[in-house]
């Protein structure tokens, strides 16, 4: 979470992302994930890793570190939440 000093708190979620074109299907990210949210799927005789439940990710980075070819990277999610607090009201905006 970040704050800009005015009472606005900004949360920018970071989740792992897998590039299927680069993934070799070795399964090291699957073994490294403590939440067990990554699996291997086969499509047209090519295995690649798939993140089944990105919301359950605890952002430990083990999958990123385990990938020998950098097919797993950390990526900012497309959701940004701004929460504004004041003495009179609280406002939540999802961008």
Image: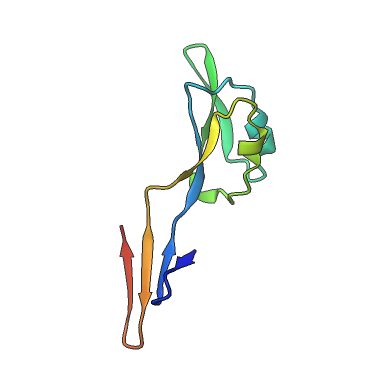
Quadrant including the C terminus: bottom left
Name the residue: 68% across, 37% down.
32
Give coordinates of residue 86: x percent, y percent.
35, 83
Colour scheme of the picture:
rainbow
Name the residue: 47% across, 65% down.
2
> On the picture, is 85 further left or further right than 33?
left
Query: Depth check: 77 or 39 in front?
Result: 77
Give coordinates of residue 20: x percent, y percent.
48, 25
Q: Is residue 4 visible?
A: yes
As drawn, 89 above or below 82: below
Q: Residue furthest front?
A: 5
> Based on the displayed image, in which of its 4 quarters is residue 6 positioned?
bottom left
As drawn, 89 above or below 68: below
Name the residue: 60% across, 25% down.
69
Q: Is residue 53 visible?
A: no
As drawn, 40 above or below 3: above
> On the picture, is 49 further left or further right than 13?
right
Give coordinates of residue 76: x percent, y percent.
44, 47
Give coordinates of residue 57: x percent, y percent.
56, 48
> On the picture, is 66 further left or further right than 75?
right
Name the residue: 58% across, 29% down.
70
């Amino acid at each position: 979470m970040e704050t800009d000093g005015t009472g606005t708190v900004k949360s920018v979620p970071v989740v792992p992302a897998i590039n299927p074109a680069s993934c070799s299907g070795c399964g090291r990210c699957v073994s490294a994930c403590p939440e067990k949210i990554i699996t291997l799927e086969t499509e047209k005789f090519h295995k690649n890793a798939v993140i089944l439940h990105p919301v359950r990710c605890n952002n430990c980075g083990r999958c990123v570190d385990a990938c020998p070819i950098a097919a797993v990277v950390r990526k900012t999610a497309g959701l940004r939440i701004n929460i504004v607090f004041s003495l009179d009201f609280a406002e939540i905006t999802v961008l």
